[in-house]
Amino acid sequence: MQTSVTPDAISAVLSNPSFDSSSSDRSEIVVQVVDLKPIGNRYTFSANDGKTRVKAMFTASLTPEIISGKIQNLGLIRLLDFTVNDISGKSTKYFLVTKCESVASALDSEINLEGKIEDEAGAAKRQKLDHSPMSDVVSTGITLKPKQEFVAKSASQIITEQRGNAAPAARMSMTRRVHPLVSLNPYQGSWTIKVRVTNKGVMRNYRNARGEGCVFNVELTDEEVRKLIQATMFNDAARKFYGRFQLGKNDYEMTLNENSEVEEASDEEMFVPETIFNFVPIEELGMYVNQKELIDLIGVVQSVSPTMSIRRRTDNEMIPKRDITLADESKKTVVVSLWNNLATGIGQELLDMADKSPVIAIKSLKVGDFQGVSLSTISGSNVVINPESPEAKKLKSWYDSEGKETSMSSIGSGMSPSAKNGSWSMYADRVPLSQITSNPSLGEDKPVFFSTRGYISFIKPDQTMWYQGCKTCNKKVTEAMDSGYWCESCQKKDGECRLRYIMVVKVSDSTGEAWFSSFNDEAEKIIGCSADELNKLRSEGGEVNEFQTKLKEATWSSHLFRTSVTQNEYNGEKRQRITVKAVAPVDFAAESRLLLQDISKKNTSASH
């Protein structure tokens, strides 16, 4: 039986541009299969000859042999027919294996012939070992194990056997194979990983129908820093491991139980993994409002608030909170709420150095709609102060040279102020007008909220466009008997009142048109002046009707609207009422990104 790879086989193939795998006089090529992974109905791997590795792929015809276990990860195969191809856009090559045969099942580790020089006497001595059916076969420093028979066993049987055969931790660390995180998948049984803790959550207590318990999680990464993985521990496992894990968006998550083992790799060569960020500019946060996706952010600290205590609704527990304001090169600012330990620890550190305008990077933030757009940390969030990254250096350079003298505006301006009335980002629930008007039952049970983009196509000049409002509470006032205005709500008289808009406008887009009701704040943005100023224009005479001119200027301008749809009854007939909750000018850069996102989604749907 072949017990080793063919030395330098891969280098010989790659150095021969006219290589023909079908040639009858070519030498035998045996390689080791490393990092075997499924891609669709095929499998990719790295072919290893002990000195060189090359990317490779099995054709779909070989998939049954992999599933059956004939071809295994870390096993040896003899290449019978394959081609050498170029990877598109790169100067590297890969093997496309169309025919092969298994030589040996999985080894204990990846073959590495570099530096493994042994004297002939030692090799000859090993060759004299008695090779019983159950003993290991040793050749050129590679250990092979006899092919195992697959026997169906229950989970309890497997756990019992693992407990009975478990070796001491020190000996296990020398014999077991360490898997890279990228190789893990939900279908693996037992495995060993060597990782560092990049983030650690707090221990949380919970209560549900099955009783009470505790839970915490950690984020882990390995030397390759190609993947983060989240480990979650409940109850006994949480209490067992919480002290063991110390701080140094996951393709898979793992759950550890009380039978898992965690060892500190104190004698191992240390590695310092970098936290992997995927930053979102502040000006693009609107598209993530109230979405499940968490975002990463980098910004310059503008201000830091003192710590405040907030009572949690679920259990009435008081938890610390601290708000920080960040800015970036988009000249926008956003408020980030730090909670729990981040508020008292990192938050206090930021408060002490706020005058130096540090750059911070935050991983895993939740985007909410308070004051238009707001960010909050979660238990898995990670904050890095003045990170050593190109993005941080670029941002700091911009801020020192021009940013600190630049006028900033909040990303929430132009978006709705509160989630209480259902107002979200202008980029959430975007629909055309026809989707609202074609469904007359919308809002029948409760208000329904949408965002839309349209043009003001008509404003009735003879409608009642405002009312007389109290200067204190904005409620409607009536003229007093003698003079002044009486407010029933405030129960007082005032010498003056303030006119406040209450008007309807026709909005059109490419799919249809509809009448929108708008109130004072939104109407001021549409008309471009206050109701008092517009009333003054209407009362003025002259050859040019400034009132009509002002209304005309407001038409055929594009706006983003956040609307509520309800059903009102008029003369026994239910009618749909569309009310403007927020209005903002069109940000064409953000609109273009939204359109590209929609195109990408449609292309993805079409491909499936």
Image (cartoon, rainbow, N blue to C red):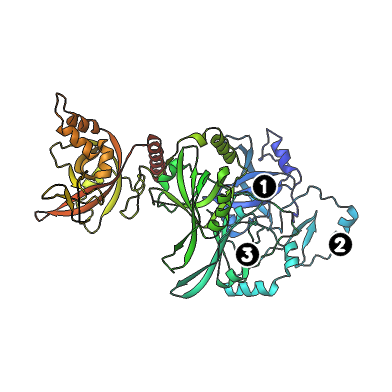
Q: What residue type is labelled 1?
A: Ala
Circle 3 packing at 10 Å, graded few (<14), some (14-19), many (20+), is few
Look at discs 2 and 1 and give the one toward the viewer: 1
Circle 2 packing at 10 Å, graded few (<14), some (14-19), many (20+), is few
User: Residue 541, relative to residue 605: is it above or below?
Assistant: above
- Residue at the spot of label 3: 190
User: What residue is at 26 percent from the left and 38 percent from the top?
Assistant: 526
Q: What residue type is labelled 2?
A: Lys
Q: Hey, which quadrant is residue 68 in on the image? A: bottom right
Regarding residue 46, the answer to whether it shows in the image is yes
Residue 80, position as x, y percentages in the image: 66, 46
Dot 1 or dot 3: first in sequence order is 1
3D distance between C-alphas at marks 2 and 1:
31 Å
Decide which of 237, 503 is in the foreground and name it: 503
- Residue at the spot of label 1: 47
Decide which of 85, 479 is in the foreground and name it: 479
User: What residue is at 63 percent from the left and 63 percent from the top?
Assistant: 245
